């Protein structure tokens, strides 16, 4: 058996402790599979004294994660502290600079600094891996970079934020409002006290930008992801969608259009009977489409101690077995900034308007849609309360620009009481 | 860029031609991803003159696949001829003996000879890979051996024969009989003229035995898979199952029980709302459960030119990148024969009896079930025609042995007109 792979862990929160547990529980099995032992050498976290439910006495302790990353007796740094800059970034850079492999779960950091870090890793001839950063325990980065490596990928999409999917499926199941379910999710620990990063779609967009870079061989372009959160989704939207055979999901889509890359993270309607429509609770799902493979679907737990540790261990095992491939599946130096699609792709849309309940308003709205060649497939007006007339319209396939122009005009009407809600109906 | 990986392809049927297409179409992309070019050097098939829709003039031709496997200018042999013995086995063995990597889609061959071949590959220090042999294009072997390599796997199960799933979902959707749908499947090319290997569960059992070895680190034990086909499933069974919220699937399950490994390939009832229950047509799905990851689900096309070629290319790309790991995820030399669970795991069962329509029969049957502590959850008698009384019973959880003993006694009754049908209800 070859010499051990010596591991340092920066961050001993839930995930860090999970990794320690996993290595301690399965030491022999892991050694047999990897052909060499995995050995945790040193750890670092904010408070040394805290009980984390795992024995740490066998490992050296470093207060400073950068010092941890630089230790001579370490081959691989696991970064599970989080934070897009600060100590996480500093210790990853220090590890790469001193020729150590890095495994991280830090999507926010990679969404901003992934390109530079990938280049640094390549220059040093070491691996930078991030399976745990995207869709938790699902080995989706591996599927994209390795299993499907023979394909040209056309679209990758998925539900990648468990908190949002929990909220949307709970609203659907119980008839509770967005606000009430969000409070419950916070009480259960599924949502942060400040939930913006989750419900605003930012966390999921971090993940999508990493998948897009991996799928299409372009630089990570997080700043080019169109992001819309689930905050404006009402129970009525969910019920309207259900009546038409759809579920509402916070769906990330990255696809190659003729004029460039389209990256969207937004609430979409998907068919109830589709795998995405069936996805409930905090699970994640990623759909990958390639030219030879067709469509494949990957489902699993998107967060939590065990699943995240599992993804980290998968990366560690690859490195222990000697696999060193570029972080995004091809040499980072050669990755170009993506051309971003200016038109986006056509789609049918679900539209909800809040209009004053007066004569002629509907005619005006219909005329504006018609002027912009946005053609109406279904229309439903409900719940007049004497003042407002909520109106739901489902369009036929329409270019995004036409819809946006029509919505801008409709918003400007005096009769328009609130910004229209427009949800894309994603073709699966 | 490093020197090319030189490939020989034995077999130019649909899959072989698909691999050629893929390498020709994506040459530059593959080279960028692998860090070196993939170069098809030589090919072999039964008839040289046949038009396969791809240009082969750039490649050397060998009539004899063994000669192909031994060529000095080849680094890797792709075996896509099929057949568990004969030329396929001969050329794989020749390739390994001459120190060449092997990628194969041949589940039947590996189910019988996988252990010996894996040992041979390891001794030679080369890779033996078989992603395409299990669940077509789904990168499930990779997920098990690499992505989830940190876990102890507790259960792996799935729908791994597209023909059977097509037949069962078509019966369900159209109300046609098993025989009629089978004929259609044959006309569409989904089922062979002799469909036994598919509908009898043998093809799927080959795949299950490979997954089990990979998941549990034991020798392939195809001869220890309990196999039951879908030939006895009637439309009535499908409707009865649907009424209770289940679908019938040819489901392969391999799981670690306390007393050993259980491997079954048999028609089972699964909840309609589960991912397995939702799986339609020729798609495949594999569910993997591990101690840290929890449950993950993988879905995709289970056969066909593109998906199978995609899986083969995934293996080739790994080898091009320098990844050489044991075929079953840990050294083959160290793999032991699995202990086979003698009791199997408890389950609820769907039972269908054909009884003579006479007084007292039901009482006798109920008494026998009771004697063996098989407890009845639901019972439904339907369609008396004056002679036979079809009876459907759903049991509570029961040990397999108790059920078998009860069914043997019931079969022996004069009132029993046909062998009872017993379908396991798989817990998901």
Image: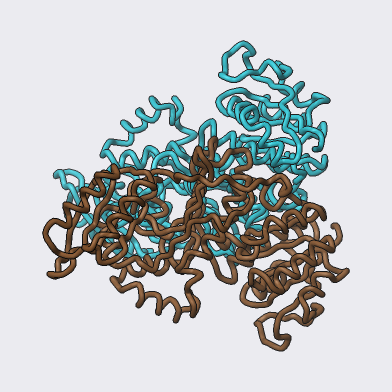
Chain colours: A brown, B cyan
Position in image of residue B312 (x %, y %): 63, 36
- Whether residue A275 appears in this view of the structure is yes
Position in image of residue B45 (x %, y %): 65, 19
Q: Name the quadrant of the N terminus of chain A.
A: bottom right
- In depth, the one of A280 and A72 nearer the eye is A72
- In depth, the one of B275 and A273 nearer the eye is A273
Residue B170 to residue B353: above or below: above
- In depth, the one of B175 and B387 nearer the eye is B175
Q: Residue at x 15, y 70 (%)?
A: A387
Q: Residue at x 59, y 38 (%)?
A: A151
With B195 as the anchor, is B130 left or right in this view?
right
Position in image of residue A44 (x %, y %): 75, 78
- Whether residue B82 appears in this view of the structure is no
Q: Residue at x 76, y 45 (%)?
A: B324
Q: Quadrant of residue B407?
A: bottom left
With A167 as the anchor, is A72 left or right in this view?
right
**Extreme residue toward the right, this view:** A72
Q: Residue at x 51, y 53 (%)?
A: A298
**Extreme residue toward the top, this view:** B49
**Extreme residue toward the bottom, this view:** A49
Position in image of residue A345 (x %, y %): 43, 44
């Amino acid at each position: 058996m070859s010499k051990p792979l010596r591991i340092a862990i920066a961050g001993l929160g839930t995930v860090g402790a999970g990794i320690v547990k996993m290595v301690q529980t399965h030491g022999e099995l892991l050694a047999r599979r990897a052909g060499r032992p995995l050995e945790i050498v040193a750890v670092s976290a904010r408070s040394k004294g805290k009980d984390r439910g795992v024995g740490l006495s066998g490992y050296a302790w470093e207060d400073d994660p950068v010092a941890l990353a630089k230790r001579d007796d370490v081959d691989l740094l696991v970064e599970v502290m989080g934070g897009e800059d600060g100590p996480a970034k500093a210790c990853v850079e220090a590890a790469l600079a001193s020729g150590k492999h890095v495994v991280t779960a830090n999507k926010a950091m990679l969404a901003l600094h992934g390109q530079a870090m990938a280049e640094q890793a390549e220059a040093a001839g070491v691996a930078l891996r991030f399976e745990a950063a995207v869709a938790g325990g699902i080995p989706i980065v591996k599927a994209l970079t390795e299993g499907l490596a023979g394909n040209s990928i056309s679209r990758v999409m998925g539900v990648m934020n468990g908190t949002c999917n929990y909220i949307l499926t709970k609203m659907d199941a119980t008839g509770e409002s967005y606000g009430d379910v969000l409070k419950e999710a916070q009480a259960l620990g599924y949502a942060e006290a400040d939930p913006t990063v989750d419900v605003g779609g930012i966390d999921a967009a971090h993940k999508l930008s990493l998948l897009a870079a991996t799928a299409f061989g372009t630089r990570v372009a997080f700043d080019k992801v169109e992001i819309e959160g689930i905050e404006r989704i009402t129970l009525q939207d969910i019920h309207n969608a259900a009546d038409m055979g759809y579920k509402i999901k916070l769906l990330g889509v990255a696809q190659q259009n003729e004029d460039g890359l389209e990256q969207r993270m937004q609430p979409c309607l998907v068919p109830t009977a589709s795998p995405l429509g069936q996805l409930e609770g905090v699970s994640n799902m990623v759909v990958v489409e390639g030219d030879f493979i067709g469509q494949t679907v990957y489902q699993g737990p998107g967060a939590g101690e065990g699943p995240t540790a599992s993804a980290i261990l998968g990366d560690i095992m690859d490195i222990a077995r000697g696999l060193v491939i570029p972080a995004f599946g091809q040499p980072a130096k050669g990755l170009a900034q993506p051309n971003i699609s200016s038109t986006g792709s056509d789609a049918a849309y679900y539209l909800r308007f809040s209009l004053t309940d007066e004569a002629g308003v509907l005619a005006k709205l219909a005329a504006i849609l018609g002027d912009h060649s946005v053609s109406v497939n279904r229309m439903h007006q409900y719940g007049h309360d004497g003042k407002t007339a909520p109106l739901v319209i489902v369009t036929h396939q329409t270019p995004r620009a036409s819809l946006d122009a029509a919505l801008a005009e409709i918003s400007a009407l005096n009769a328009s009481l609130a910004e229209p809600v427009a949800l894309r109906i994603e073709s699966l």
